Image (spheres, grey):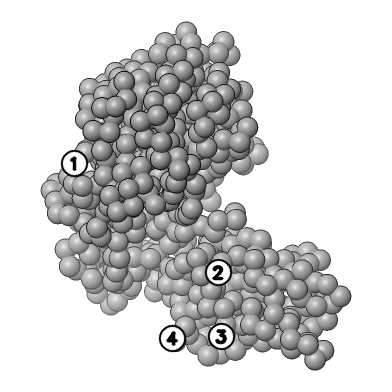
C-alpha cells in the first residue's frame, strides 16, 4: 500500500488573505443577491484588476500541523498545483518556504524561524507540479512565468509544459507506483478560448504532444516494470463537469487526456484547480480532485485528503480514503463522512 | 463516555428508545420535542420529513457517536420481536471529536420502515454547526435553548470601525505597497457579515496563538490583564483585523470586552485546541493536551528516481 496526502491550491502570496473573482462570484451566487451597493462593488472590483485569491496564513499553519500530527505516517505529500498565487518571485518564495524548508527537528511542523513547513521529516517526499497560478507573470494573470521551474528545480525539472515522473517504491511490499505529472498550463495567452480576457487566467490546454508523451512514457514503464502501477497527475481535471463558469476553468481538449489515459490503461487521475473536493468518472477513468488547502475565503471549504492505493499486477486500486475539512468552530481539520 | 452526564444519556436514550419502540417512530420523536436541557448538555430531536428525523447533541462530554452507539443502534424489542436496525455507515470512522470543541453536531437519519418496523437507519447527513444557526432555524420550538446559550456579540461601534478598516486597508496603505484587496471591500458586508468575519478571524487567531503557547510548554497562558489584551495578542490582532492605525486601540479594547462578556456568561470560545477562560485578573487560554500519534513513524516508501533510467 502507498499512502498519499493529497492537497492542492495553496495559493501562497506575499500579500495574504486576498480574494479573487472566482471566490467573489461564488459568494454572490451563494447569497443569491448582489452586494448592497453593486455599482460601488463593481468599481472596487475593477480597481482591483481581478487579482487572484491568496492564502490564509492561519490555515496554512494548521494544514502543516494537521498533516504532521495526523498524517505523519503517510508515504508522500502530493500537491496538485497552484502552490503560489502568481509566479512572481515574492509569491513563489512564500510557497518555497512552506514546501522546502526543513523543520527544526524531525516531527515538527515549524522551521527554525518558527514558520510552518510541510517538511517535517527530511525523508518525506513532497512532490508537486505547477498550476495555472504558478505560471502567472503578474497579478493580472498573464501566462508563461518560469519562476516556478527555477525555484523548484529539485522537484520539477521538466520546465514549462513538461512531464515529470515520480517513481514510488514500497520497500516492504515492493509495490511500485509511478506518478506521471503533466503541466497543461497555457504556454501563451493566445491559447485560451476566445471567451475573453478572464479565460487565460483559469484555463489550461491538453496539448496533444504532451498527452502523446504521457501515453508513450506509460507504455515504457509498463514494459520495464510490468508489476508497477501508474497514476496520472494534472492540475486541471480533464472532465467536462469541471469547466467552471462559462468555461473559465476548463482544460481545453480534455477529451484527449481521457482518450490517452484509456489507451495507457490508467485508472486514476489526481487533480486540483477547481477548489472542490469531488470525483468524476469519465469514460471509466476516475478523476479525484482535491479541495483548496488554505486559500482564503474559500466557499467550498478547505481540505486535506488521504488516499491509499494498492498496486498489484500493474493494476491500481484505491483501498482507503479520508477527507478532512477545516471546521471554523472546532478550529481544526475534521474528518468528513465518506458518503457526503 | 465515562465522563458523560447520566441524566443526558438517559434522556437521549429515552428519546431514541421511544422512537424505535413506537409503531410510528417519527410521530413519537416529534411528540418529544421541543427539547430539554440537562445541566449544560442539550439533546434536540426534530422531525424533518415523513421518514426522517434529526438528532442534535450539544455537550462538552458526550459525542454523537457515543449516543448513537449506546442507544440508537442497540437492538430493541417491538411486539415480541427483536429489532436490530442496520446502520449503513461506519460510525466509528465518521464521528471524530465532536465533543469538547463547542459545536453542535447533528445527524439526519432516514428510517427504513417495513410493516411498521425499523429495518434500517441510514445516516443521511452529519454536520458540525454553529450553535446559533440551529437556534435560528428552530427558534419557535426551542426558546429555552436560546436562553441557555450565550452568544458572542460585537458592539455596533466595533463593526463600524472594522468596516472603516476595510476601506483604510485598500486606500491608505504605504505608498508603493502592493495593492491589497479583500472580499470584504468588494461585498460591502452588512453588520451580521462583518461580525462573522471578525469571529472567523478571531477563532483562527486564538487557535494559532494557543498552538504557539503549547509549543513553548505554556498550557494556561494569560493573554490579558483585566483591562485589555497583552501586547502579544494585539500584534496578532493587528495582523488580522483591518483597522486604521489610530482606531486600532478601540478595536482591540472592544474585542476584548466582547470576548470577556461572552466567556464570563458561560460561552465557549475555543476549539479542539482548548478554550478561552475568564478570571478576575483577565483572560487566559486553557490549552488541551494533544497526543500525536503519527509523528516519526517509519516510512517504507521512497522516491526512487533511479527507476527512470530504463525510461527514455
> How far is mark 2 from mark 4, CA to CA?
20 Å
> How far is mark 2 from mark 3, CA to CA?
20 Å
Task: Give coordinates of residue B258: x percent, y percent.
Answer: 40, 62
Marks 1, 4 in one chain: no
> How far is mark 3 from mark 4, CA to CA?
11 Å
Q: Residue B8 carries which label?
A: 3
Q: Name the residue under label 1.
A: A101
Q: In this view, does B215 lie to the left or right of B25?
A: left
Which residue shows up at 23% across the image and 71% down it?
B219
Direction right: furthest residue: B115
Q: The disc numbered 2 marks a residue on which chain?
A: B
Q: Which of marks 3 and 4 is in front?
A: 4
Query: Which quadrant holds residue B294?
Result: bottom left
Which residue shows up at 40% across the image and 58% down it?
A331
Q: Name the residue under label 4.
A: B3
Instruction: Say if mark 1 contacts mark 3, CB within 8 Å.
Output: no
Which residue shows up at 52% across the image and 64% down it?
B94
Q: Which of marks 1 and 4 is in front?
A: 1
Which residue shows up at 48% across the image and 42% down it?
A315
Element type at mark 3: helix
Q: The disc numbered 4 marks a residue on which chain?
A: B
Q: Residue B91 carries which label?
A: 2
Task: Give coordinates of residue A69: x percent, y percent.
Answer: 30, 59
Q: The disc numbered 1 marks a residue on which chain?
A: A
Q: Nearer the viewer, mark 1 or mark 3?
A: 1
The mark nearer the N terminus, 2 or 3, is 3
Amino acid at each position: 500500500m502507498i499512502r498519499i496526502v493529497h492537497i492542492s491550491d495553496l495559493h501562497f502570496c506575499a500579500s495574504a488573505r486576498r480574494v479573487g473573482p472566482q471566490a467573489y462570484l461564488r459568494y454572490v451566487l451563494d447569497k443569491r443577491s448582489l452586494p448592497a451597493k453593486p455599482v460601488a462593488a463593481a468599481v472596487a472590483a475593477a480597481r482591483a484588476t481581478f487579482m487572484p485569491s491568496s492564502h490564509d496564513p492561519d490555515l496554512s499553519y494548521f494544514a502543516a500541523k494537521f498533516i504532521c500530527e495526523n498524517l505523519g505516517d503517510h508515504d508522500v505529500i502530493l500537491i496538485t498545483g497552484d502552490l503560489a498565487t502568481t509566479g512572481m518571485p515574492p509569491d513563489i518564495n512564500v510557497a518555497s518556504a512552506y514546501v522546502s524548508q526543513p523543520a527544526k527537528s524531525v516531527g515538527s511542523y515549524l522551521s527554525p524561524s518558527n514558520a510552518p513547513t510541510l517538511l517535517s521529516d527530511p525523508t518525506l517526499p513532497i512532490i508537486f507540479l505547477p498550476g495555472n497560478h504558478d505560471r502567472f507573470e503578474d497579478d493580472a494573470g498573464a501566462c508563461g512565468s518560469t519562476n516556478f521551474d527555477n525555484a523548484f528545480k529539485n522537484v520539477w525539472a521538466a520546465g514549462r509544459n513538461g512531464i515529470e515522473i515520480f517513481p514510488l517504491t514500497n520497500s516492504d511490499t515492493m509495490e511500485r507506483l509511478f506518478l506521471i505529472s503533466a503541466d497543461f498550463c497555457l504556454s501563451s495567452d493566445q491559447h485560451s478560448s476566445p471567451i475573453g480576457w478572464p479565460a487565460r487566467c483559469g484555463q489550461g490546454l491538453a496539448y496533444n504532444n504532451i498527452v502523446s508523451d504521457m501515453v508513450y512514457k506509460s507504455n515504457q514503464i509498463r514494459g520495464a516494470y510490468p508489476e508497477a502501477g501508474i497514476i496520472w497527475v494534472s492540475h486541471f481535471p480533464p472532465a467536462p463537469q469541471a469547466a467552471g463558469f462559462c468555461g473559465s476553468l476548463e482544460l481545453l481538449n480534455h477529451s484527449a487526456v481521457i482518450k490517452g489515459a484509456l489507451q495507457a490503461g490508467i485508472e486514476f487521475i489526481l487533480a486540483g484547480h477547481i477548489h472542490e473536493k469531488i470525483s468524476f468518472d469519465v469514460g471509466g477513468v476516475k478523476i479525484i480532485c482535491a479541495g483548496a488547502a488554505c486559500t482564503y475565503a474559500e466557499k467550498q471549504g478547505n481540505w486535506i485528503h488521504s488516499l491509499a492505493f494498492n498496486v498489484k499486477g500493474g493494476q491500481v486500486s484505491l483501498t482507503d480514503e479520508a477527507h478532512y475539512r477545516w471546521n471554523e468552530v472546532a478550529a481544526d481539520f475534521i474528518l468528513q463522512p465518506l458518503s457526503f | 463516555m465515562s465522563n458523560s452526564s447520566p441524566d443526558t444519556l438517559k434522556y437521549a436514550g429515552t428519546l431514541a428508545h421511544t422512537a424505535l419502540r413506537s409503531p410510528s417512530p417519527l410521530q413519537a420523536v416529534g411528540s418529544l420535542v421541543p427539547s430539554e436541557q440537562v445541566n449544560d448538555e442539550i439533546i434536540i430531536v426534530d422531525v424533518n420529513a415523513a421518514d426522517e428525523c434529526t438528532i442534535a447533541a450539544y455537550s462538552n462530554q458526550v459525542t454523537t457517536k457515543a449516543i448513537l452507539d449506546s442507544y440508537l443502534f442497540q437492538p430493541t424489542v417491538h411486539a415480541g420481536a427483536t429489532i436490530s436496525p442496520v446502520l449503513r455507515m461506519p460510525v466509528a470512522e465518521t464521528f471524530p471529536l465532536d465533543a469538547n470543541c463547542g459545536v453542535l453536531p447533528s445527524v439526519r437519519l432516514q428510517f427504513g420502515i417495513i410493516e411498521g418496523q425499523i429495518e434500517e437507519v441510514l445516516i443521511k447527513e452529519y454536520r458540525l454547526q454553529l450553535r446559533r444557526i440551529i437556534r435560528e432555524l428552530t427558534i419557535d420550538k426551542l426558546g429555552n435553548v436560546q436562553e441557555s446559550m450565550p452568544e458572542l456579540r460585537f458592539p455596533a461601534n466595533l463593526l463600524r470601525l472594522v468596516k472603516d478598516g476595510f476601506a483604510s486597508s485598500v486606500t491608505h496603505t504605504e505608498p508603493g505597497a502592493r495593492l491589497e484587496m479583500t472580499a470584504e471591500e468588494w461585498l460591502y458586508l452588512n453588520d451580521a457579515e462583518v461580525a462573522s468575519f471578525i469571529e472567523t478571524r478571531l477563532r483562527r487567531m486564538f487557535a494559532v496563538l494557543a498552538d504557539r503557547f503549547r509549543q513553548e510548554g505554556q498550557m494556561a497562558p494569560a493573554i490579558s490583564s483585566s483591562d485589555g489584551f497583552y501586547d502579544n495578542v494585539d500584534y496578532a490582532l493587528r495582523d488580522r483585523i483591518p483597522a486604521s492605525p489610530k482606531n486600532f486601540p478601540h478595536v482591540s479594547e472592544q474585542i476584548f470586552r466582547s470576548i470577556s462578556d461572552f466567556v464570563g456568561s458561560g460561552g465557549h470560545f475555543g476549539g479542539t485546541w482548548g478554550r478561552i477562560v475568564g478570571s478576575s485578573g483577565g483572560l487566559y487560554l486553557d490549552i488541551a493536551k494533544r497526543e500525536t500519534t503519527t509523528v516519526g513513524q517509519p516510512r517504507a516508501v521512497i522516491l526512487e528516481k533511479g527507476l527512470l533510467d530504463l525510461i527514455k
